[in-house]
Amino acid sequence: ALTLMNDPAYVEMAAALAKRMQDHAGYDTRAKLDHGFRLAVSREPTKRELDTLAMTFENGVAASRKESDGWFDAASVILNLHETITKP
């Protein structure tokens, strides 16, 4: 997990996914998080997964006061899921 999080390519991928989520149509944060999850995992997130992503997003925004950091944090979580890394 730490190897992926520190890899320059991984950081670029997380930034790109964060931008796609941020630019997704509409203004609903949860819908944007759902969109990013579906792009990476190819399935709908459970309520618990979506709640966790929303909390990650909110914590990222609160820590830095930048919405873009919240999107990056959520994208990093999505890309670091076991399910994302080890697709069959």
Image (spheres, rainbow, N blue to C red):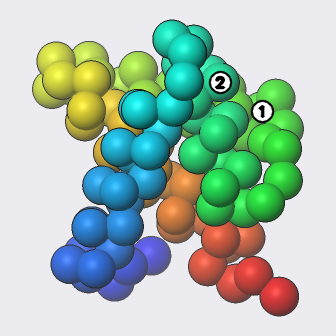
Q: Which mark is residue 31?
A: 2
> Residue 11 lies in what quarter of the image?
bottom left
Position of residue 83 relative to residue 75, above or below, is below
Q: Which amino acid does label 1 sit on?
A: Arg
| Residue drawn 61% across the image and 79% down it | 85
| Residue drawn 82% across the image and 29% down it | 47
Question: Who comes first in sequence, dot 2 or dot 1?
Answer: 2
Position of residue 88 relative to residue 39, above or below, is below
Q: Residue furthest front?
A: 25
| Residue drawn 58% across the image and 34% down it | 33
Q: Which of 25 and 14 is in front in this view?
A: 25
Position of residue 86 relative to residue 18, above or below, is below
Q: Nearer the viewer, residue 14 or 50?
A: 14
Q: Where is residue 83 in the image (x, y as percent from the top left)?
A: 73, 70
Q: Residue furthest bottom?
A: 88
Q: What residue type is labelled 2?
A: Ala
Work out which quarter of the rendered image holds the C terminus and state it: bottom right
Q: Which mark is residue 48?
A: 1
> Residue 51 lies in what quarter of the image?
top right
**In the visual, does 73 lie left or right of 64?**
right
